[in-house]
Image (cartoon, rainbow, N blue to C red):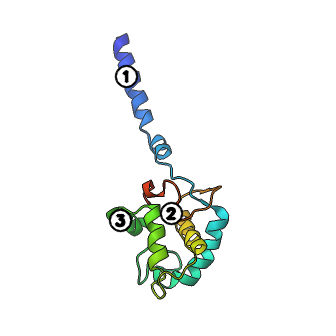
């Protein structure tokens, strides 16, 4: 009987370790940008991106940049933060590809990450940042 209770206790502990709270903690999104950078990104996004991607990043004539549709696209393209920065730098806005300054690319990417529940941190986001090739973009 004591052995059975130990097995039950071990099983309960294992289930608690796999609880949604524990899973969320394991899958926490990294802090990749500063709050000021995301705030600056709102202005860049409004001026250069919203006409095609929508005021709420919902997608209009271009894909959504947050939510389920964005998540499906990001997964299908194996999108990383590094590749998102590259796409924005080289091909956005569609009306004038490559016209954004490096700090604008970082700012608008920070805003997109913020809108997809990535937390702000202490270091600014920039192309070529360490580890960005390994961070998958998820909504």
Looking at the image, residue 26 lies above or below residue 68 = above
C-alpha span from label 2 to label 3: 13 Å
Figure disc tally:
3
Quadrant into which the C terminus falls:
bottom left
* x then y, percent, for residue 66: 46, 68
Crowdedness near tag 3: few (<14), some (14–19) or many (≥20) residues, C-alpha within 10 Å: few
Quadrant into which the N terminus falls:
top left
Q: Disc 1 on helix, strand or loop? A: helix
Q: Which residue occupies the extreme right position in the image?
A: 36
* x then y, percent, for residue 13: 43, 28
C-alpha span from label 2 to label 1: 39 Å
Q: Is residue 102 left or right of residue 92?
A: right
Q: Residue at x 35, y 65 (%)?
A: 72
Q: Which mark is residue 61?
A: none
Q: Which residue occupies the extreme front position in the image?
A: 128
Query: Mark 3 — residue?
Result: 72
Can residue 107 be seen by looking at this rendering? yes
Q: Disc 3 on helix, strand or loop? A: helix
Q: Disc 2 on helix, strand or loop? A: loop
Looking at the image, residue 92 lies above or below residue 106 = below
Task: Pick whichever, 47 or 97, lies toward us.
Answer: 97
Can residue 58 be seen by looking at this rendering? no
C-alpha span from label 3 to label 1: 39 Å
Query: Mark 1 — residue?
Result: 8
Task: Pick whichever, 118 or 93, lies toward us.
Answer: 93
Query: Mark 2 — residue?
Result: 116
* x then y, percent, for residue 121: 62, 55
Q: Is residue 133 left or right of residue 120?
A: left
């Amino acid at each position: 009987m004591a052995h059975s209770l130990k097995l039950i206790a071990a099983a309960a502990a294992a289930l608690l370790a796999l609880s949604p709270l524990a899973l969320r903690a394991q899958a926490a999104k990294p802090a990749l940008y500063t709050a000021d950078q995301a705030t600056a990104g709102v202005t860049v996004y409004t001026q250069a991106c919203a006409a095609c991607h929508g005021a709420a990043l919902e997608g209009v004539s271009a894909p959504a940049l947050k939510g389920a549709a964005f998540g499906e696209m990001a997964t299908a393209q194996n999108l990383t933060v590094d590749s998102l920065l590259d796409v924005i730098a080289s091909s956005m806005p569609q009306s004038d590809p490559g016209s954004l300054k490096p700090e604008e690319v970082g700012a608008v990417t920070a805003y997109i990450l913020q809108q997809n529940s990535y937390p702000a941190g202490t270091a600014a986001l920039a192309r070529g940042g360490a580890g960005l090739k390994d961070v998958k973009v998820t909504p």
